[in-house]
Structures are given as C-alpha cells and as structure tokens.
Image (tube, rainbow, N blue to C red):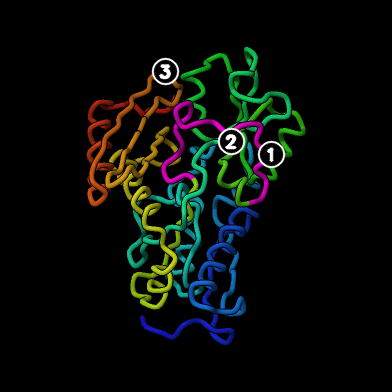
C-alpha cells in the first residue's frame, strides 16, 4: 500500500487505548512524526479504542488478570481496527504486547527507552527495605508478586489494578501500604515525584521491554513503515528484540513471572533474565553476552536453556 504523506485532509490515524499514559505515548509518537517530517498537528488524528483489558478492569477490578485471559488483552481490538483500515498505526506499551503479531501486522518501531526501573509507591515508607513484617502490598503483576515473595514471604499481597491514577487513589484510601508502577510511565505523565524510590534492576529485574513504546502498523503500508523508520531508535530496538526473543522462547505471557533486561555495552548486548515460581519459592536466573547483530539469537538461546532447566510444571499456578 503506497500513498502520500498525511495531511489535514487525509490524516494519519493513530490508534491507542484511552488511559492518560496511553494517550501520552500516542502524543509523543505524533510529536516525533511531526518533527521528523515537518507536518502540522492536523495531519494526525488520535483514535481511542477500548480494549478487553479496559472493560474488564472496570467490571472485574479485583480479579487477577490471569483469570480473565492475557495474551492480547490490551491489544486485540486495536489490532483488529488496524487490519480493518480504521487506523493506520497503533501505539503500545511494548511490555503489554504478545510476542507474535497477527498476520498482516508488524511491530518494528520502538521509541527511545525510558527508565526501566520499577517505582516503589507509598505514603508511609521510603523503600522495600522499610516495610514492616506483614505489610500489605498491592500489585496485579505476577512478576512483582513472585519477586517480592522470594525476598519477603511475610508480606501480604492484594490484587491492585487500574491505571496510574486509580492505583494512587487506592493507596490514598488505605487499600495497601505500598504498590509498584513503572518509573517510565510516571516520568511520561510528569509524575515521577509520586515514587518514594526507584528500585534498581539488581533488586527487582523489570518486565520484558519495560519503558519502551512500540508502534505497530500494517505490513503492506509502505508509507507508514517509511515514516515510522524515521523515528525508530535502533539501540532500544536491539534491546527489545533481545528481551522479546527470551520471552518468546519461554512462551511467556502475563500469567508467567518472567523478567529480563538487556543493555548495550560497546558492540555487544548483555542480557539478564529470570523466571520464578508463582509463589516465589524458586527462581532461576541466566545471563549472556553476544554481538549486537546476534541479539535475537542470544535471547532465544538463553530462554530455551532456562526453560530446559526449569522442566515441566515450573509455571503451574497455585
């Protein structure tokens, strides 16, 4: 599909979820495209699309995500709209994306990666180490829960979902003593000061691709692909490809506690990854280094080796 650059008469339609963070990411994408091609704001149209995840959050806010169904929970309706031609590109938090795209769609554009760390959020305590015995932690992330249980099995974990503003309100209401958010999301919302502290990756390895905005489009839309190529951040792309290959090898989803972080060191990529039992009773870790052009191979091989080490039943839910 070849067409002219977007214009006010024929705008590029950008699909996104409707949360404040999702909209902030869509606006960042639009602004980068405007700058790269000298286009006016009117040449772009932000289209808000409600996803299954958004609806279920409202209806079943206290149910764990794993009971609802995870792969594509926050992307399915957006991708369907793109395949129908209702939108031209879709902006996602890459950590929410399944490792495989539907036929006809490609995910090959990533914006510069933000802070990868998890944020510790609490009005009472400054850090994880300050939490008293038996403190209540609010989180819907199986990764964070398992990592916490590995370090602090005394903590009480309660289901805690919703957008950034909803979670902060729950803390104000005393539902939990603390919670976690991604530092990247808080930074993009201008709310980094809401974090009592940032947790270093050595203490809590982040989710795959955390902090990265991914932009999806139709594989046959040459104009969109050329425009997106102009704002693609190669280093972030290499890191994300490495981590997502690790996740794909493990067949990971929101139902499995998996963490990974890759970093560029000169001409090489260094990957650290871990998988955990859902109750935090066991953690397996791995790491490796490879040339940049072998980032995907490194992720795949480390994931396959870790999966073999784990054996059958490692991710069985309790």
Q: Secondary structure at mark 2?
A: strand
* 137 up-or-down from 251: above or below: above
| Residue 121, image x, y percentages | 65, 33
Residue 22 tag number? none
Q: Quadrant of the N terminus?
A: bottom left
Of mark 2 and mark 1, the one earlier in the sequence is: 2
Q: Secondary structure at mark 3?
A: loop
Residue 119 tag number? 2
Question: Is residue 213 highlighted in magenta?
Answer: no
**Which residue position holds label 3?**
281
| Residue 265, image x, y percentages | 33, 42
Q: Is residue 219 left or right of residue 30?
A: left
For label 2, the crowd category at 10 Å Cα-Cα, with few meaning under 14, some 14 to 19 and many 20 or more, is: many
Find the magenta span and give its range. 189-210
Between 59 and 248, which is closer to the camera in this rendering?
248
**Which residue position holds label 1?**
194
């Amino acid at each position: 599909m070849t067409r002219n650059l977007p214009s006010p008469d024929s705008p590029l339609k950008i699909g996104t979820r409707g949360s404040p963070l999702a909209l902030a990411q869509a606006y960042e994408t639009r602004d980068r495209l405007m700058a790269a091609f000298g286009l006016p704001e009117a040449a772009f149209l932000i289209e808000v699309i409600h996803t299954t995840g958004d609806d279920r959050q409202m209806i079943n806010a206290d149910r764990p995500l794993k009971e609802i169904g995870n792969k594509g929970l926050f992307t399915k309706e957006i991708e369907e709209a793109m395949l129908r031609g209702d939108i031209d590109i879709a902006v996602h938090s890459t950590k929410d994306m399944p490792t495989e795209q539907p036929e006809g769609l490609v995910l090959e554009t990533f914006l510069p990666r933000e802070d990868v760390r998890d944020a510790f959020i609490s009005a009472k305590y400054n850090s994880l180490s300050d939490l008293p015995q038996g403190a209540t932690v609010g989180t819907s992330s199986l990764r964070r829960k398992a990592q916490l249980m590995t370090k602090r099995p005394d903590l009480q974990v309660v289901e805690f979902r919703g957008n950034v503003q909803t979670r902060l309100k729950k803390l104000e209401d005393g539902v939990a003593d603390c919670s976690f958010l991604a530092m990247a999301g808080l930074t993009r919302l201008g709310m980094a000061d809401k974090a009592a502290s940032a947790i270093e990756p050595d203490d809590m390895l982040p989710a795959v691709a955390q902090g990265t905005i991914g932009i999806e489009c139709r594989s046959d839309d040459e104009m969109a692909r050329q425009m997106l190529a102009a704002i693609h951040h190669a280093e972030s792309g290499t890191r994300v490809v490495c981590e997502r290959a690790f996740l794909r090898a493990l067949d990971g989803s929101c139902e499995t506690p998996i963490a990974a972080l890759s970093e560029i060191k000169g001409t090489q990529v260094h990957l650290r990854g871990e998988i955990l039992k859902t109750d935090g009773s066991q953690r397996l870790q791995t790491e490796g280094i490879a040339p940049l052009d072998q980032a995907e191979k490194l992720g795949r091989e480390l994931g396959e080796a870790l999966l073999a080490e784990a054996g059958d039943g490692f991710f069985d839910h309790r």
